[in-house]
Amino acid sequence: MVIILKKDSDKAQLDSLVNWLSGKGVEVHKTVGTTQTILGLVGDTSRLDIDLISAMEIVEAVRRVQEPYKSAGRKFHPEDTVIKVGDTQVGGGTLTLIAGPCSVESEEQICEIAKSVKASGATMLRGGAFKPRTSPYSFQGLRGEGLRLLSIAKKLTGLPVVSEIMDISQLPLFDDVDVIQVGARNMQNFELLRELGQAKKPILLKRGLSSTYEELLMSAEYIMAGGNEQVILCERGIRTFETYTRNTMDVAAAPVLKELSHLPVIIDPSHSSGRSALVAPLACAAVAAGADGLIIEVHNDPPHALCDGPQSIRPQAFDALARRLHVLSDAMRQAV
């Protein structure tokens, strides 16, 4: 249930209403916007008298929310969420560019790439330390050592770090990681999501291989229900009948998710395509569709990369792409 309050509502009346609702056994989430204040009610609201609430002096309207995702839904939170990460942000009109290798391979490799992507305008550094691979014989990442090397690159460049977690037991190792990524295979690892709900840092949540929009938002709800409202949604392509590309990028994900949810949405053109030649056009399509940012795999030697070389672009290509994306982003903002 959503209670929309009248403009300039009396604070004493508001506090009284919140206390009364809490006494009825429902959890109250207050959202203060530029034009109105909204109370989102979570819990068993079936016993609340809508007519009684509607008749209160400070109440503008009362609406039932049918969607199962309450905290992630836009009805509870009409204004876009902006997530601060270090000196940058995700959402709020900022084009976020997260770039770096699929996997951290050495100190020289990650530091060289970090310096390069920062010079090209990247606002965050991505790098895998724990790698979920289809084959148990493939490179699994440097694990704790990889996170240590990411910390070195972070100190060198000042770029906030994004890295993927695979299990709850790894959480203590992520103290110096600024944004914890939940990969497609773990999107419905509900125990992990519950634990991340207690985390005090942003979570980048990737859409599962065959998951619907609602399933993605329900996974975000698990995190937010635990108290962590810093969730970034990520479309990384879904599995379809097409085999030419690694996955199929759902370009509609950006506008649809932004209609359903207030959370920022970024796109991963690297995993969507699996082909480096397709990264640039898909990235441009994502920005044109309204995405808040991109996460792009950049490697200084793709043919010899230990993981996902075919979909990684070189630093020079990222530099050219970043310039195109900023021009496109500026044009899209001016066109609105």
Image (spheres, grey):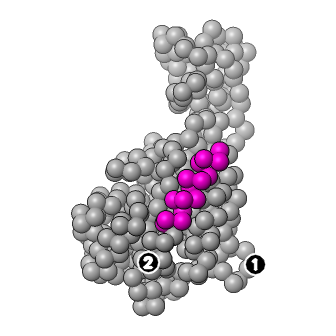
Q: Nearer the viewer, residue 331 or 26?
A: 331
Q: Which mark is residue 316?
A: 2
Residue stretch rendered in magenta on the structure? 322-336
Q: Are marks 2 and 1 in contact (CB under 8 Å)?
A: no
Residue 9 falls in which quadrant of the image? Answer: top right
Q: Nearer the viewer, residue 277 or 257?
A: 277
Q: Quick one: label 2 or label 1, which is nearer the N terminus?
A: 1
Q: Amino acid at mark 1?
A: Phe
- Give the tally of numbered discs: 2
Q: Residues within 10 Å of mark 2 (few under 14, many from 20)?
A: some
Q: CA distance from mark 2 to mark 1?
A: 33 Å
Residue sitting at x 52%, y 10%: 10
Residue sitting at x 51%, y 70%: 321
Q: Mark 2 falls on what kind of element?
A: helix
Q: Nearer the viewer, residue 101 or 174?
A: 101
Judging by the rendered image, the residue that carries numbered circle 1 is 241
Q: Amino acid at mark 2?
A: Gln
Q: Nearer the viewer, mark 2 or mark 1?
A: 2
Residue 319 percent location from the top left of the image: 45, 71
Q: Which quarter of the rendered picture does the C terminus lie within? A: top right
Q: Which quarter of the rendered picture does the N terminus lie within? A: top right
Please determine whether, in this image, residue 122 is positioned above or below residue 198.
below
Residue 300 percent location from the top left of the image: 39, 82
Residue 146 percent location from the top left of the image: 31, 74
Please determine whether, in this image, residue 285 is positioned above or below residue 81.
below
Q: Residues within 10 Å of mark 1 (few under 14, many from 20)?
A: few
Residue sitting at x 33%, y 61%: 159
Please determine whether, in this image, residue 268 is positioned above or below residue 9.
below
Q: Is the magenta region chiefly helix, strand or loop?
A: helix
Is 78 displayed left or right of 104 in the figure? Answer: right
